[in-house]
Image (cartoon, coloured by chain):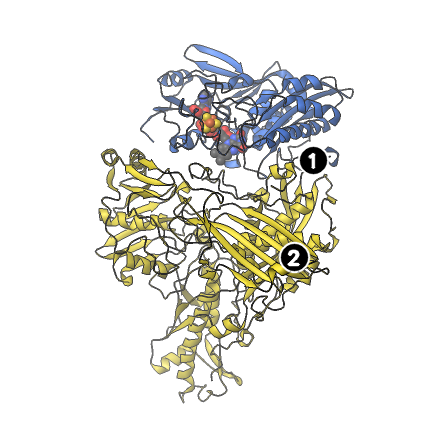
Chain colours: A yellow, B blue
Amino acid sequence: MLDIIPTRDPAHIRHGSNSGQPLTRRDGALKVTGAARYAADNHPPKMLYAVMAVSSIARGRVVSLDVAAAKRHPGVVEVMTEQNRPALAEDPDAKTNPFMFRYEAMQNDRVRYANQPIAVVIAETLEAATEGAALLAPTYEVEPARTGLDGNESFVPPAVGVGNPSALRHGDVDGALKTSAHAIDVTYETPAQYHNAMEPHGIVAQWDGDKLSIDTPTQGLVMMQARIAGLFGIPPGNVHIRSPFLGGGFGSKGLISGPVVLGLLAAKLVQRPVKLVLRRDQMYGPVGHRSPTRQRLRMATAKDGALTAIDHHAKVASSTFDDFFEPAANASHSLYASPAIAISHEAVRLDNGTPLFMRAPGEAPGSLALECAIDEMALACGMDPLAFRLKNYAEVEPISGRPFSSKALRECYTQGAERFGWAKRPLEPRQMRDENGFLVGWGMGTAIFPALMFAAEARAVVRRDGSATMETGAHDMGQGAWTALAQIAADALALGIDEVEFKAGTSDLPDAGIAGGSAHTATAGSAIHNAGAAVIAKLAELATSDQRSPLFGAGNAGVIARGGRLHRRDDDSRSESYVDILARAGLAEVEARGNGAIDPAAQANYAMQAHGAVFAEVKVDPELGQIRVSRMVGAFAAGRVINPRLVKSQYFGGMIWGISFTLHEEAITDRRSGRIMNANLAEYHVPVNADVPPMEALMIDEHDPYVNPLGIKGVGEIAITGSAGAVANAVWHATGVRVRRFPIRIDDLLKGGDG
Amino acid sequence: MKRFDYVRPNTLTEAISAAAEPGAAYLAGGTNLLDLMKGGIAHPTRLVDVSRLPGLDRIERQADGSWRIGALVRNADLAQDPDFAKAFPAIVEALLSGASGQLRNAATVGGNLLQRTRCSYFYDPASACNKRTVGSGCDAREGDNRLHAILGWSDSCIATHPSDFCVPLTGFDAIVEIAGKNGSREVTVEALHPLPGTTPERDSVLAPGELITALRLPATASTFAGHARYLKVRDRTSYAFALVSAAAGLVIENGTVKEARLALGGIAAKPWRARSAEAMLAGARPERAAFEPAARAALTEAKPSGDNAFKIELAERVIVRALMLAAAGTPDRVPALPASPFSSHAGAALHA
Ligand SMILES: Cc1cc2nc3c(=O)[nH]c(=O)nc-3n(C[C@H](O)[C@H](O)[C@H](O)COP(=O)(O)OP(=O)(O)OC[C@H]3O[C@@H](n4cnc5c(N)ncnc54)[C@H](O)[C@@H]3O)c2cc1C
Ligand code: SF4
C-alpha cells in the first residue's frame, strides 16, 4: 500500500508546512478595502428592489392590504401578495424530514408571529419600494398572542435539536436525590435571543427561463440548492448560488428562510432581477432565534463531593407551526461523572417565529445552567469549584460508558487555572476588593461541545503546467474557511499555499456540507485531504509503474509527496516532479475526488467531544451593582489546530458571546402583543468594546486518532460554553448574590438576587 | 414615510420663515430625527436643514465670565474644547458618556436638547402612545417599563428624557436662547421640557417654528469646576442610555459645602433638578452622612410607574456616589470611561 493513503492516525500523516501556521485571512485585504462582494453588493442590470411588508400582530389574519395605493406610488412596479404570488411546486408548510423547516411565503392570510412577511413591494428604487410597503396599511383580525413560558399548555416534545431524544434516564436519580449527603434544586432562566449577524439576510435573484442565478449568504449551499429546486420544480443543476462571503451566520443562515423564497418569487413575478434585503428589525422573526429556557437542575453528592445524581430538566418554546426544541438539558449528558443522570425537556408553543439553530444550540443555555449549578453544588459541599469538577471528572462518557476519542480537559483545567491564578481564590464570596474598592469575583466553567462531522466531497486537479486546483463548495462566514481550508488543500497536494487555486463558495462545486455544528473544517477539510491523497495516489501509480521514472518499482517502499514532487520513501534522493510525471504520461492533468464523512465504527466506539475550561474575573460596584468583566482565560482542547490565529479568534468570539449571554442579550417581547420591543442594535445589547476585557485563549495539545483523518474537532461554538457560566459564577463570587435569571442586571444585584 | 420638502436656508431669518409652515421641522445632525422619520414616528412635511447656518457653531467665553455655545456645535467638538472642559468638567463627562463617538460627531447641541424619548412603545407605531398620537393611550403602562420614569410621570405618559448632556446643564442653570418669528426669548434648560401631565405630546416649551440658537452657561456655573462630576449607571459599560444618572457640583469652603447642585437623568420626562437636596447640603460637611439624607430627600416623591421600583433605590445610591465623587474633587483629566462607575478615578474611599 502506498504511504499517501490516509491512515486512521493523523500522527502518521505528513503535514506540510501549511497546517498549523497562523496565516492571516487570505481574504483580509479584500474585506478591509471593501472589494469583497457580499450578496447585497450585486446589482445585475435591470435589477429591481423588493421590500417586505411585515405583520405587526403576532396572531390572526390579514384582512386587507391597500395594494392599489402601493401600486400608485411612482416607481412601484408590482405588489406581490398571497393573491398573485407565483405558484410553488412544494408547500412551504410541508415537512418531509426533520431538517426541513416551515416558513412563510405568503401561502395564505394567516399571521403566525410578529414581523412575518405579508406582502412584497417591488420597485425601481429601494425608496419607492419602502414607501409602497408603508402604503399597504394592512388591517388584521387579531387573536390573542401566546407569549411566555407560563400560562400556555406544555408538552413533551418527541425529539429535541435534530432528532435527539427528548429524555434520557440512567441510574436511580430519584433515589440518589433523596438519600445523598448534599443536594441542590435550582432553576435558571434564559431569555429569547436573536442571531443579529452584521450582514442582514438578503438575496439577489435572477431568472433565465427555468434557470436561477442567486447571490445570497448561506451556510449550506448544496442543501439550499436542493431545497430551491424542490420548491420551484426544477433540476438542482438549474440553480446556481454564489455565497463567497457571509457577514456572519451563527446558524441563522443555515436553512432557507421565507424572505429568501420571497426574493425568488418576486423575481419570477416581475421577470427581472430582484434584490431583497431585510431591515434589522425584520430579522426578529422570520430567520430564527434562540428559544427562552427555564432549566431546573437537581444534583446530589456523597459526603466527599462525588456526584450521585444529575437531573436536568429544560422547558423551552417552539412556534405554533413548527418543531424546533432547544436541546438545553443535553448539556448534562457527557460532562460530569455521575452514576445517575436524567435529562428531560418540555415545551410550549408560542406565537413567535420558529426558533432555530443559534451558535451552540442547546449547549449554550444548557451549559450556563449546568455550570452555575455545579458551582452551587460545589459550594454545598464546601469545595473549591475546580476541585469539585476534578473530583467528578468523567474518564469515560457517563451514560454510555464509551471511552473518549481524546480528552485533554484535565490539561485545560490545569493550564487555565495556572495562567489565571485560580489557586489564590478564596472559597467564600465577597472576599476580594480591588484598589478602587470594587468587589472582585472569580468564576469558572467547563466548556464542552460535540465533535461533529457531516458529509462532504472535494475535487482535486494537478496539471502538467504545474498548476493545481482544489474545489469544494465551502462557506466562509468570517471564520476563515478561505484560509484554513486552503492550508489543508496545500498540504493535501504537498504544494505551497500559493501554488494551489482553492475554490469555494458556489453551488456548482462539490458539496462541502453545511458550515454548522462547528464541523466545517473537519468535514470539508477531510474531503479536501482525501481528494489530495487520491490525486497523489494517481500520480504515484503513474510514476511507480513506469520504467522510465526514477520512482519505478517503489510500490512496496512507498513514496512521499513533498513540494510538488514524489520522493521514494526509502531513498529521498530519488524523486520526480508532478509535472514530469504528467508530461511523460502524456496527460494534461490528473483529477480525483475525495469524501469526508463520519466513520460509523469510530462513532459507535468512542464519545467525541471537544473540551475546555474558562476562568473569569468580574468587578462589581458594591453599591450600584454595575458589572464589568475584567479578565478572562480560556483553555481549550479541540484536536488538531489548522490555523492558530483563526482558532484563537473563534475562541475569543465565543468567550465574548459568553459575556453577552450572561450580562447583555435579551429580546424583550411585549407579553400582550407578541412584538419584540428592542429589535434594533441600540437596545438589543451585545457587549461593546468597553465590556470586553483582556482575554487569553490557550490552545491545549490534543491528538485524536479517531474523530477524522485530520484529527480536527470544531472550535466555532465551544467557547460560549463554559464562558457564560464562568462569568455568572464570578458575579456570585464577587457579590454573594446568586442571580438565576439571565441576563444578570443591576436590579438583581440591588435586590440581593434570587430573581 | 412620506414626501417632504427639503430646504437649506442661508440665514437665520430664512430658516425661521421656512419653518413657519405647519408640519415643518428643523434638521440638525439628524441622528434622532431621521430615525424617527424612517420608523414612521415623525412625519414632517418640510425639513429645514439648519446644519449649515452660519454663526451657530461657536463656543465663546463672554467678558462677564459666562459662556455661549452655538446650537450647531457638535457634541464631540464641545467635549473636546479644553477651556470649556476646564470650566465645566461634569458637562463634558456627560457629553462623552452619551451615545458613541460616531454619533457625537454628528449630534448637535440643539438636537441633543430636543431629542425625543427612547420609550420603545413610542418607537413602535403599532403600539398605543399618547406622546405620538394624542389620546391613543399608553402601552408602556402595562408593558415593559423597567426603564421608565419614577418622578413627575402622569397616567398619560411615563416616558423619560434620555439626554445626558441636559442633566448637568439643568444643574448649572443653563439657559437656552430661542429665535422665532416673533423675536427672541430665553428659557432655562430646566424649564425647556414640561412634565407630561395630560399633554405628553408636548416635548418642549418651544412653539412650532422656534429655533434654538444658543446655550448659555452663567459665570457662576464654573465656580463648581473643582468639584463637579457626572455619574451614569447603565446596562453595559458604554453605548447605552442611563438607567439613572446624576450630575453633582459642590463649592466647598473651609470644609463645608457652600453651595450644591444636583440634577438627575433617566428618571423623568425632563432632566430633574433636586433643589430640596441642594438646600439640605448647603452648610453641611461634604460627607456620606450628609449626602444620604439629601439623596432620600431628592426621591421623596418618587414612585414606580411600573416594574421599575429599583430605580428609586438606585437613584439614591447614584446621588450619594456622585456627591462623593464631586467632594473628592474633579480629576485633572476626563477619566477613561467617562461617567462610568468604572471610570479609573474612583477611589476606595468612595465605596461602602
Ligand atoms: C444609538 C443611539 C444611542 C444614543 N445614546 C445616547 C446617550 O447615551 N445619551 C444621550 O444623551 N443621547 C444619546 N443618543 C441621542 C443623541 O444624543 C441625539 O440623537 C442627538 O443629540 C441629537 O442631535 P442631532 O443634532 O442629531 O438632532 P436631530 O436628530 O437633527 O434633531 C433632534 C430634534 O431636535 C430638533 N432640533 C434640532 N436642532 C434644533 C434647533 N437648533 N432648534 C430647534 N429644534 C432643533 C429637530 O427638529 C428634532 O426634533 C443616542 C442616539 C442614538 C441613535
Ligand atoms: S410612556 Fe409616553 S412615550 Fe411611552 S408609550 Fe406611554 S405615552 Fe408613549
Given residues B298 and B217, the one toward you in this image is: B298
Residue at 67% from the left image edge and 59% from the top image edge: A179
Residue A225 vertical position relative to residue B346 in the rendered view, above or below: below
Q: Is residue B29 visible?
A: no
Given residues B228 and A110, the one toward you in this image is: A110
Quadrant for the N terminus of chain B in the image: top left
Quadrant for the C terminus of chain B in the image: top right
Given residues A367 and A690, the one toward you in this image is: A367
- Measured as percent of width and height from the top left, residue A3 is found at 49, 81
Q: Quadrant of residue A690?
A: top right
* Circle 1: element type: loop
The reply to the same-chain question for discs 2 and 1 is no
Within-10-Å neighbours for mark 1: few <14, some 14–19, many 20+: many
- Measured as percent of width and height from the top left, residue A395 is found at 63, 68
- Measured as percent of width and height from the top left, residue A440 is found at 70, 44
- Measured as percent of width and height from the top left, residue A67 is found at 24, 36
Callout 2: residue from which chain?
Answer: A
Q: CA distance from mark 2 to mark 1?
A: 49 Å
Quick one: which residue is furthest to the right in this view?
B254
Quick one: which residue is furthest to the left in this view?
A209
Q: Is residue B229 visible?
A: yes
Residues marked 2 and 1 touching at CB (< 8 Å): no
On the image, numbered disc 1 is attached to which residue? B346
* Circle 2: element type: helix
Residue at 34% from the left image edge and 24% from the top image edge: B45
Callout 1: residue from which chain?
Answer: B
Hey, what amino acid is under mark 1? Ala
How many numbered markers are drawn? 2
Within-10-Å neighbours for mark 2: few <14, some 14–19, many 20+: few
Which of the numbered marks, if any, corresponds to residue A178? 2
Hey, what amino acid is under mark 2? Lys
